[in-house]
Amino acid sequence: MRVVTAARLGALAGAAAVVAVVVLYFVPSGDYILLPDVAHPVAPLVHVEGAHAAKGSGGIYFVDIFERRASELEALFPWLHSEGTLLPAKEIVPPGVSDQAARQADLREMTISEQVAAAVALRRLGYHVVAKPDGVIVSEIEPDSNAAKVLRPTDVIVSVDGTPTLTVAKLRAALAGASIGQVVRLGVRRGSRTLGFAVKTVVDPLDPKRAIIGFTPDQSASISLPVRVSIDAGNVGGPSAGLAFALEVLEQFGRNVDRGYRIAATGQMELDGSVAPIGGVKQKTYGARKAHADLFLVPAGDNAAEARRYADGLRIVAVKSFPQALRVLATLPPKR
């Protein structure tokens, strides 16, 4: 009879454990993982017709994150990536939407962000910018709402029950008479198509008497710029680089915005110049640190509070608007 020694059993157990780890590493989980990427200079991405960029050291940097499906191993042992964050898939990809469709939505958000950033910067420089409201962008969708079944990020709501809703205020007015649980008919522009969806309203968690669709609205507009501005972020998606882009447009016009410092910036740029919150702040703070930024401009509120938790000496400055960001940078002494 063959005798299996303890050493042999230990070797077999070790081999089985290795195989299990390898399998778990390659099997996707139901979660996504966010990981930091080093902050990148914006200057190579922005080109303004007839502009003359400011000279000197420093620069404006945007921060991005790596976002992908987590493996079962990473989901079981999240501490494998101390700088990462695990999120349920439904918070990244709405139910019923493919990963590819969600990625395309991210890229459309980036395109919108580029246009808005250019408009805000040119207005600051005194140019006349035409921005005509043309609907309400679906920014974030409540995962458990009925809207999550049919709407996608970057969809544009153009009507409710046949009533045009070209602004956020008009959308809210159209929903004011709706009761909780009522089905409303939405006219939706998705890319080059106009679609119609029936959606049952849900209760507003902040007002139990008010009916809502279940998404965060942003203003969509047809923007006409008096100067040609080209921003090419490649495969980077999402709206969070808006503030960095707007700052760089001013740099391209010869304004010494950075004053010789490495300025990392994140925040969604709104047409009125306000800076809206974004996601992935933990990873973006790590990214700013890895780029040896001198200063990190972050949307005020929860974003800034989270950035400070991971700053480790990096100066975090909370801002609510583009003019405020410019005032902060203008107070920096010229770097030697």
Image (tube, rainbow, N blue to C red):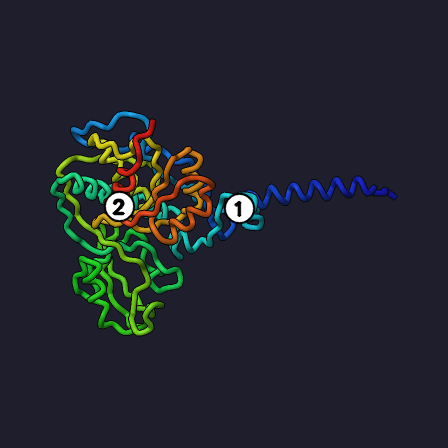
Q: In the image, what residue occupies the spot 13% across and 40% down?
A: 126
Q: In this view, does 163 lie to the left or right of 99?
A: left
Quadrant housing residue 245: top left
Q: Quadrant of the C terminus?
A: top left
Q: In the rendering, at what x and y percent does residue 271 appear? A: 21, 49
Q: How many labels does the image show?
A: 2
Please state which amino acid type lies under the numbered disc 1.
Ser
Q: Quadrant of the N terminus?
A: top right
Q: Is residue 40 left or right of residue 73?
A: left
Q: In the rendering, at what x and y percent does residue 297 appear? A: 34, 42
Q: Where is mark 1, residue-wise?
A: 71
C-alpha distance separating marks 1 and 2: 42 Å
Q: Please, what secondary structure does the residue beneath circle 2 have?
A: helix
Please state which amino acid type lies under the numbered disc 2.
Gln
Q: In the image, what residue occupies the spot 24% across and 62% down?
A: 186
Q: In this view, does 52 lie above or below 84?
A: above
Q: Is residue 16 above or below residue 178?
A: above
Q: In this view, does 329 lie above or below 86?
A: above
Q: Please, what secondary structure does the residue beneath circle 1 have?
A: strand
How crowded is the residue under tag 1: few (<14 C-alpha within 10 Å), some, or many (20+)?
many
Q: In the image, what residue occupies the spot 24% across and 28% down?
A: 54
Q: In the image, what residue occupies the spot 17% across and 48% down?
A: 222
Q: In the rendering, at what x and y percent does residue 172 appear? A: 23, 64
Q: Where is mark 2, residue-wise?
A: 324
* Relative depth, front residue between 72 and 86: 86
Q: Can residue 294 be seen in this view?
A: yes
Q: In the rendering, at what x and y percent does residue 213 appear? A: 30, 64
Q: In this view, does 274 lie above or below 122?
A: below
How crowded is the residue under tag 2: few (<14 C-alpha within 10 Å), some, or many (20+)?
some
- Nearer to us of marks 1 and 2 is 2
